[in-house]
Amino acid sequence: MTRTWFVTGTDTGVGKTAVSCALLAAAARAGLRTAAIKPVAAGCDASGRNEDALLLMQWMTEPLAYEQVNPVALSAAIAPHIAAQQEGRSLQASRLAGLCRGVMLAGADFVLIEGAGGWRVPISARETLADVAVQLQAGVILVVGMRLGCINHALLTAEAIARDGLRLAGWVANQPGEIMPSYAENLDSLRRMLPAPLLGEVPCLLPFDVEQASRGLSLEALTGM
């Protein structure tokens, strides 16, 4: 049975892609067939491809075409709804959800859908990427960037996820830069206050090592493995 999770973050630049790749590596090590989709990516190279989507492809086990992994590739590295408007394109949550379902039905055991930025990132004047997760009724994995302000951002995001009727399946503490002051105390506060299990901690790794990061994560709360 396919298990699907929507990966969101407390903000942009908190390491959603790095953590997603580490989760994919951990799932593959557990013998699961894995796939991922980044339905909307803003910020592409000259060939029209997004670095995050390419990294997901590198770490998933299933041989999906780039267009399946990143069906909407926007050139400018700005908010998706603004990038789409600049290109004369229209984004709809229902269409994006349909594209995600195509990957979900492709045969993988473990599927990640990576959002863009945080939970309420707009894709149009009326919809956000959260509407895609709602239409899919996916469990949510929250990547918490461990830096000043993370407790407030994490709790507000968890409240928004619950208000949208979805389950926060777990969260990952990711250190995207230098270790924050009082890291242990902040982590303890998050463990007590977030209504979901901690899937693991990812330290600051320079350069980032997906395999090493994956060994600090547990899939038990997600898959029972």
Image (cartoon, grey):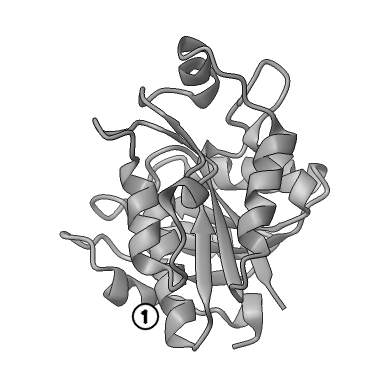
Percent across and percent down for residue 159 are 72, 44
What residue does disc 1 label? 215
Towards the viewer: 203 or 91: 91
Structural crowding at the residue carrying mark 1, measured as other residues with C-alpha within 10 Å and reported as few (<14), some (14–19) or many (≥20): some
Q: Quadrant of the C terminus?
A: bottom right
Towards the viewer: 159 or 182: 159
Residue kind at label 1, given as amino acid type = Arg
At 36% from the left edge and 25% from the top edge, which residue is drawn?
A: 75
Percent across and percent down for residue 176 are 31, 51
Up the image or down, 58 lies above or below 10; here it is below
At 56% from the left edge and 41% from the top edge, which residue is drawn?
A: 152
Can residue 181 be seen by looking at this rendering?
no
Up the image or down, 43 lies above or below 111; here it is above
Percent across and percent down for residue 171 are 56, 62
Q: Is residue 210 left or right of residue 117?
A: left
Percent across and percent down for residue 213 are 33, 71
Q: Quadrant of the N terminus?
A: bottom right
Total number of numbered labels? 1
Can residue 71 be seen by looking at this rendering?
yes
Q: Is residue 156 left or right of residue 44?
A: right
Q: Is residue 136 left or right of residue 104?
A: right
At 64% from the left edge and 75% from the top edge, which residue is drawn?
A: 222
Towards the viewer: 41 or 64: 64
Q: Quadrant of residue 55?
A: bottom left
